[in-house]
Image (spheres, grey):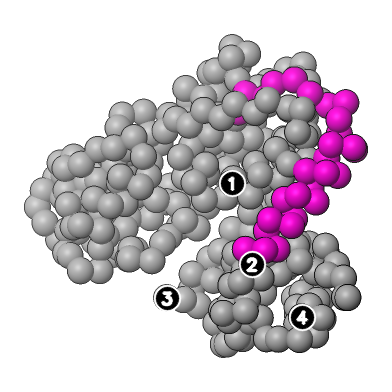
Amino acid sequence: MRDLPITLLRTFVVVAETLNLTVAAGRLHRAPSTISMQLSRLEDLVSTELLERGQYGVRLTPAGELLRSHAQLLLNQHDRILGAFLNAEIGGKVRFGTHDQYATRSLPPLLETFVLNYPEVRLEVQCDHRPQHLVALVQQRKLDLALVEMPLLSDGGQRLGRDDLVWVRSPLHQAHLREPLPLAVFVEGCYHRDAALQALEQWETPFRVAFTSQSRAGVLAAVRAGIGVGVIPRSTLEEGLVVVEEGLPPLPKTGTTLFVAEQVNEATTRLAQIIRESPQFTHAGFEASHWLLHQLG
């Protein structure tokens, strides 16, 4: 009976998630050639093709889809067992605040890793679209740490990566050509909303708020339906959205910023370290996302 090395399975799961060897290599801190060799070795061990490689990335074969589900279960159990032995002395509560765009996209695999490796820690996550509100909660010691999006030149916190805001619309609708310009945005207090309204006012562009929501999913659903134009970081561009490159005012650059309260426990320090070391929140990670979006677009 052959054994499947945990390292190979972990690489495969990341590749299955990203469907791009370059992006996966960045997350795993390895060269793309190393990733490719590990995948080939895994295919040799299971005696079947797991991936179909193409010009713009990879796709899973039926066998790859089957292995993906089994591999994730095995990795979760492996990490849970290891964490119970190595980190059993680390406990307590971690109160973490963040924006919906991080909680639904970049953070889930990191939080999963944290929960599995520190089973005695009680993690509490609070999502809010108002970055200044989350920062205030950290300063008041009501949160232990917060990951938020701030103006690039703002003070405070640790800047992990930079991005730029862009106008987006549905490729099936011409909402950006309507007058006044209809907007689909978060409710008041969101930095994206504030930046968009300020830019439009400076350009003296007539606008109206056509749709508001407290969730990214709600805002983007309205954009896809043609109700209005939205504002998102470029690195979070999704299928079914088109960047409006002309006709609207430029939007500012932003910084993904980590705020940590003073005198936090060891568990909070460990989570902060996981976030800081993740390529998803570094400038290189954002550049990889931009490269992938360019290739797909």
Q: Which amino acid does label 2 sit on?
A: Arg
Q: What residue type is labelled 3?
A: Gly
Residue named by callout 1: 108
Q: Tell me whether the residue at label 4 lies in contact with that at label 3, contact meaning CB atoms closer than 8 angstroms.
A: no
Residue named by callout 3: 297
Residue 262 falls in image quadrant: top right
Quick one: SS at disc 1? helix
Quick one: SS at disc 2? helix
Residue density around tag 2, few if under 14, some if 14–19, many if 20 or more, within 10 Å: many
Foreground pick, 181 / 38: 38
Foreground pick, 105 / 49: 49
In this rendering, does residue 204 appear at all?
no
Foreground pick, 79 / 229: 79
Task: Say which mark, if any, is on residue 68.
Answer: 2
Magenta span has 79? Answer: yes
Q: How far apart are marks 2 and 3 (CA)?
A: 27 Å
Residue density around tag 3, few if under 14, some if 14–19, many if 20 or more, within 10 Å: few
Residue named by callout 4: 46
Indicate the position of residue 259 as horizontal and vertical percent values.
64, 29
Q: Which amino acid does label 4 sit on?
A: Val
Residue farthest to the top, as pictured:
140
> Which is more N-terminal, label 3 or label 4?
4
Indicate the position of residue 47 as horizontal and vertical percent values.
76, 86
Asked if residue 232 lies left or right of residue 13, the reply is left
Tell me which residue sits at (76%, 80%) in the image. Answer: 46
Magenta residues (range): 68-96
Tell me which residue sits at (17%, 52%) in the image. Answer: 227
Q: Distance between the residues labelled 1 and 3?
A: 25 Å
